[in-house]
Amino acid sequence: MKDHKKDEIDLALDDLKLETDVDLDKLIEKKINRRIRKIALKTVIIVVAILLLIFLCISPVMNLMNTNPAKLNKDGGTNKSSTLVKVYDAWLETNYPLRELDEKVTVAEEGFGNYTIKLHVFNTSEKIIAGDEYNVILKIKRSKVSIDKDTNNLLTNKGGMFYTKGMSWMASKTEQANIINEIKKLPESAYVDLVVSGVKPRDTSSLKRTETNDLSLEWYQVYQPSCDFQGGIAASKVKWYSGKERDKMTSAELNKAYIRNLKTLRDNKELWADLGLFSGNKQFVGGEYDLNNNIKAAEKSGVIKCKNYCVRGTKEAILEYIEKYDNDINMINVINVQLSTL
């Protein structure tokens, strides 16, 4: 009986013996690495879950709290009913002669109130190639709008284009003589975009009568002496979103189109306020300027009058225009020259 118990004890001791070929260090290292991997995997899963939770919960809230252009871009910016198309086209037309927006606008949502807006802006006096790439990129970061890319410098504000009270009349006339001499050096095939500053405000209907087969009115800066900002309206447009063609509108009809543009800008100020409004040498940035003043002045006027306007014509037609209306002109400026229409 005692021998039997002794055998059981010996067997138990044999089971407790460690095999001589087992490497304890490697075994311990393997178990530690396995535990570390499990901890690391759990940590990654937790971090990803937290980030996903933040994106799914916080990002939509920030989108709601800030300007969301994606909601205003009906049909992806290829439809005339897109608010973005209307707003940025109105902003371009009001600020810049010969600038227009192709009815193609895209918005990329980047989360947390951040967006990228792509536009195709073109110069109306140059050839428009179908399928042109976006050449202007705007960034909206938590309601702050900025220009990220302006490939052709079409959004550059050119100050000093128009005659102002602070300028010397004699100096402007001397400069005008220099510009005329430079125009004379151009080839006969050249087309010139000329900004004219008149002596007195004129109704657009009377200015339209100065047009010829080789010279056309392109843009008017609306004369509103009671307002600090002087916006503009295109005399003709390449892209038609709706309504009557501009060059067939009366002065009263143009005035209504100008008021519509101003109201579009007023009601969507968050989309352009940081980009600013430009009026000669003045710039209004941040949205502080009240466009209601211009709207009221335009409604009271009923028609469009202007001192400053833009004409386009052949070299010969432009020179004839300057000579014929010299007494009605304070200053001229060339803003674009096309050597040929080919």
Image: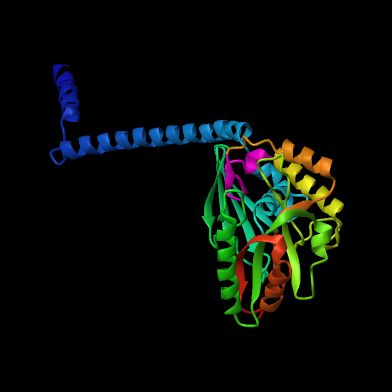
- Name the residue nearer the viewer: 155 or 228: 228
Question: Taking 174 as reference, is 264 left or right?
Answer: right
Is residue 154 in view from this perspective? no
The vertical placement of 164 against 179, above or below, is: above
> Picture coordinates of residue 83 (x, y %)?
73, 46
The vertical placement of 272 against 8, above or below, is: below
Question: Taking 321 as reference, is 254 left or right?
Answer: right
Residue 267 lies in quadrant: top right
Residues drawn in magenta: 267-285
Is residue 64 a member of the stretch shown in magenta?
Answer: no
> Which quadrant of the figure contains the C terminus?
bottom right
How many marks the image carries: the answer is 0
Task: Tell me what residue is drawn at x 57 percent, y 59 percent.
Answer: 170
Task: Tell me what residue is drawn at x 61 percent, y 82 percent.
Answer: 187
> Picture coordinates of residue 233 (x, y %)?
74, 54
Residue 35 lies in quadrant: top left
- Name the residue nearer the viewer: 126 or 295: 295
The outermost residue toward the top is: 2
> Picture coordinates of residue 225 (x, y %)?
71, 43
